[in-house]
Image: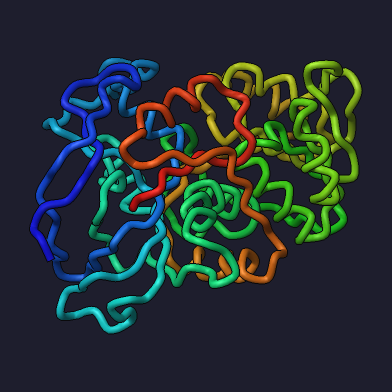
Amino acid sequence: MTNMMKVVRLHTFGGPEVLRYEDAPRPEPKTGEALVRVHAVGLNPPDWYLRDGYRSLPPEWQPSPSFPLILGSDVSGTVAASADDITRFDVGDAVYAMVRFPADVMKGGKAYAEYVTVPVSELAPKPSGIDHIHAAAAPMSLLTAWQFLIELGHDELNPFQSFRHAPVPLEGRTVLVNGAGGGVGHFAVQLAKWQGARVIAVASAKNEALMREFGVDQFIDYQKIKVDEVVRDVDLVLDAVGGKETVRFLKTLKRGGALFPVFPMGFADRDEADRLGITVSSTQVRSNGAQLLKAGRLLDDGTVRVVVDSTYPLADAARAHQRAEHGSIQGKIVLTVA
């Protein structure tokens, strides 16, 4: 095996054009790690946030990394080698993972590459019922929906709140998912239905057919209807869009309900939420191989589907980022690795 590999790296922050396809040393697995031969890489918002230098964050939170950086966290591939202490996976095993997130969020997870080392605690067998492209599209978005709605799986506090996030019972409840056509949203809709919830999906019109396939009970085209003017008495809102607009969903919730913003920055009305008896809670998704194993069973048997917006070769990562900037993504964007 050669000690070099193809990667996509950053040598400076900027737009998609700063992504360079080039050679780099192949990593070696350390204690507790496996070396994964990457077949596909899923794109996520932290990829373009880091590429751009996290300019939306306060200056004291912005990264000052050592360049070059390799972006990316979501991979599907096969085990190429492992440290001597690894017994759970063998060379040739098909696996998928979200790599070192959020631990390496400010310095890149190193997934835009032909090979990546992964802590074995973050690895799970790739669901055999789907291919590498669909498996790579799942980890961060699926784990986000899982940790918000099903099982948190860790004790870390979100820096935006003083209490531990706790999922709420979904069976028989009404759940509204905003941004239902996106990466997190399309998984959240399916997990809520799996748990027995009545689901209202909010997305653009092009997503309606997909949402009907998922069995949603009501679809709202946000470009035609203002959700907060027509929906009332919801038990839970999962807002996969987030930001300052999240506050409008307080009107849609019943007293005792919950609002879960995936991106909580900009939400400033906790006093109003308290007055209305509404819990506002968020969490930071974290790598978790055990949860990927559980959720993978749903991918395996078709209970949950992975929607892929588009695919690009690793060498065309810049074009993939341009697609992300264009917006209106249905599901996930994936890089394929030859």
Q: Residue at x 84, y 38 (%)?
A: 234
The image position of residue 134, as x and y in percent, is 54, 54
Q: Nearer the viewer, residue 60 or 296?
A: 296
Residue 48 as seen in the image, left or right of residue 53:
right
Q: Residue at x 77, y 42 (%)?
A: 210
- Total labels: the figure holds 0
The image position of residue 286, as x and y in percent, is 42, 51
Hey, which residue is sitting farthest front in the picture? 338
Q: Nearer the viewer, residue 120 or 9?
A: 9
Quadrant showing the N terminus: bottom left
Residue 91 as seen in the image, left or right of residue 248:
left
Q: Residue at x 58, y 60 (%)?
A: 151
Compared to 26, does 128 lie above or below?
below
The image position of residue 16, as x and y in percent, is 34, 22
**Residue 66 appears in which quarter of the rendering?**
top left
Q: Nearer the viewer, residue 134 or 22?
A: 22
